[in-house]
């Protein structure tokens, strides 16, 4: 007896980057102003939200993580726009015969306040993936002054994605 192949896959992603001086702060493809002039440190633009989402997409199909496809020791990805990397991951997923159904994500940061920017972040991600705006959920929370995020040493993000076989 042959078992039916699953028509849905769920992936989970996580990312964290340090806050440092002299770097842009980009989350969800939106350039933000941190009150202390801090930005996220990383090889690419260090967009924690998009990185967590890419890892969730890749994880849903057991394809590894973003470091496998965009290694930090490769100069090609230095200061890369994470939304363009997201498009590449989306194409990889589509080539494997899958599409994104919906996304649920959260960004953990004490500052800056993200609520005024969430609609634009959702738009950037939905357009990059070619999916409906209403299938992209982004929430923002603080860490109540606890841990690395609470001390403003960094910003992190978690993402869950549902893929459907096409």
Image (tube, helix red, strand yellow):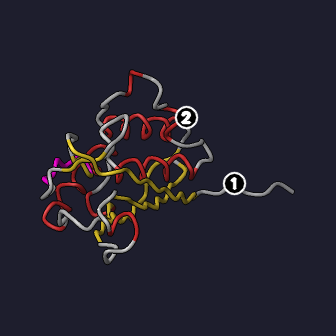
As displayed, is residue 98 above or below residue 68? below
As displayed, is residue 78 above or below residue 104? above
138 or 16, which lies in front? 16
The residue located at (28%, 35%) in the rendering is 81
Number of marks in picture: 2
Looking at the image, tell me whether mark 2 or mark 1 is earlier in sequence order: 1
At numbered mark 2, what does the secondary structure look like: helix, strand or loop?
helix
**Mark in the foreground, 2 or 1:** 2
Magenta span: 28-33
The image quadrant of residue 72 is top left
At numbered mark 1, what does the secondary structure look like: helix, strand or loop?
loop
Q: Position of residue 130 (x, y in %)?
A: 31, 45
31 or 165, which lies in front? 31
Image position of 153 (left or right of 68): left
Judge the density around disc 1: few (<14), some (14-19), many (≥20) Cα neighbours within 10 Å.
few
**Which of the labelled discs sits on residue 162, or is there none?**
none
The residue located at (29%, 47%) in the rendering is 40
Outermost residue toward the top in this view: 75
Asked if residue 31 lies in the magenta stretch, the reply is yes
Instruction: From the image, tell me which residue sits under label 2.
Output: 68
**Which of the labelled discs sits on residue 5, or is there none?**
1
Q: Position of residue 162 (x, y in %)?
A: 49, 59
Q: Position of residue 128 (x, y in %)?
A: 29, 43
Q: Quadrant of the N terminus?
A: bottom right
Asked if residue 81 lies in the magenta stretch, the reply is no
70 or 160, which lies in front? 70
Image position of 68 (left or right of 38): right
């Amino acid at each position: 007896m042959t078992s039916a192949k699953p028509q849905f896959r769920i992936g989970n992603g996580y990312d964290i980057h340090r806050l440092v001086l002299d770097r842009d702060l980009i989350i969800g493809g939106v350039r933000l102003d941190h009150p202390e002039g801090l930005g996220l440190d990383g090889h690419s633009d260090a967009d924690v939200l998009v990185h967590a989402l890419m890892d969730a997409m890749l994880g849903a199909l057991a394809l590894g993580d973003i470091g496998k496809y965009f290694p930090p020791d490769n100069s090609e990805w230095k200061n890369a726009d994470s939304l363009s990397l997201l498009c590449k991951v989306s194409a990889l997923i589509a080539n494997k015969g899958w599409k994104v159904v919906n996304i649920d994500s959260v960004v953990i940061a004490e500052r800056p306040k993200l609520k005024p920017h969430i609609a634009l972040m959702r738009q950037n991600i939905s357009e990059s993936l070619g999916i409906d705006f209403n299938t992209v959920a982004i929430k923002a929370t603080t860490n109540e002054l606890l841990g690395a995020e609470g001390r403003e040493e960094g910003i992190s993000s978690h993402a869950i994605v549902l893929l459907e076989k096409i």
